[in-house]
Image: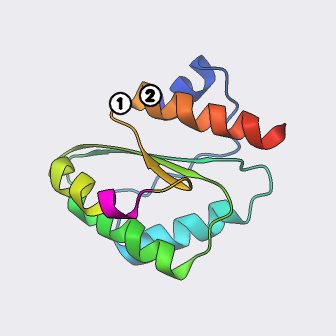
């Protein structure tokens, strides 16, 4: 729930909250992104991962594969930390663009997600 708290702290209003649990393979990520993408209230997607059991490279590969399967309307901001986060960030780096961004901290990522969501409302 700290993700929701930090979004509120920086002036945002979460449209929803989705916990992917202990695994973030491509099927889980694609399913999660499909659900979120179908919500018209979503203006940006904040993927906040602190991996313990879930490894960073598994999350990154899941995100990359999911984006091949699902066309996402809102920009995605990723914060990846914990087990194998460096490897995960390396996997994501080539895919980054104006619709897929990575921030180093939860606070930075939350600020970016809120900024982009508010910009979508303008």
Vertical side of 72 occupied by 97: above or below: above
Query: Within the magenta stretch, is there residue 35?
Result: no
Which residue corresponds to the image point at 62% horizontal and 23% vertical from the top-left? 8
Give coordinates of residue 51: x percent, y percent.
25, 47
Magenta span: predominant SS is helix
Q: Name the residue nearer the viewer: 61 or 16.
A: 61
Quadrant where the C terminus sits is top right
Residue 120 vs residue 48, the one in the foreground: 120
Q: Tell which of 34 and 115 is nearer to you.
A: 115
Q: Which element is circle 1 on? A: loop
Horizontal side, residue 22 vs residue 122: left or right: left
* Residue farthest bottom in this picture: 69
Quadrant in which residue 58 is drawn? bottom left
- The answer to whether any part of residue 97 appears in the image is yes
User: Can you say whether 79 is above or below 69 in the image?
Assistant: above
Residue at far right of view: 122
Dot 1 surroundings within 10 Å: few (below 14), some, or many (20 or more)? some
Using the rendered view, name the quadrant where residue 91 is placed.
bottom left
* Disc on res. 10: none
* Magenta highlight range: 92-96
User: Residues at badges 2 and 1 in contact (C-beta under 8 Å)?
Assistant: yes
Q: Residue placed at 20% from the left, 47% from the top?
A: 52
Q: At which x and y percent is residue 41?
A: 78, 49
Circle 2 crowding by C-alpha within 10 Å: few under 14, some 14–19, many from 20:
some
Viewed as shown, does residue 97 lie left or right of 25? right
The residue at which mark 1 appears reads as: 105
* Residue picked out by circle 2: 108
Q: Distance between the residues labelled 2 and 1?
A: 5 Å
Residue 4 screen position, x and y as percent = 56, 32
Task: Give the residue at x 59% y 46%.
Answer: 17
């Amino acid at each position: 729930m700290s993700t929701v708290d930090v979004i509120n702290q920086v002036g945002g209003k979460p449209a929803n909250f989705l916990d992917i649990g202990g695994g973030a393979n491509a099927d889980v990520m694609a399913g999660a992104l499909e659900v979120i993408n179908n919500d018209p209230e979503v203006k940006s997607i904040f993927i906040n991962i602190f991996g313990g059991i879930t490894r960073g490279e598994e999350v990154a590969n899941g995100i990359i594969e999911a984006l091949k399967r699902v066309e996402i309307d809102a920009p995605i901001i990723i914060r990846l930390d914990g087990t194998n986060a460096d490897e995960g960030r390396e996997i994501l780096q080539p895919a980054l663009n104006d619709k897929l961004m990575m921030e180093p901290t939860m606070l930075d990522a939350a600020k970016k997600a809120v900024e982009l969501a508010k910009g979508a409302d303008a």
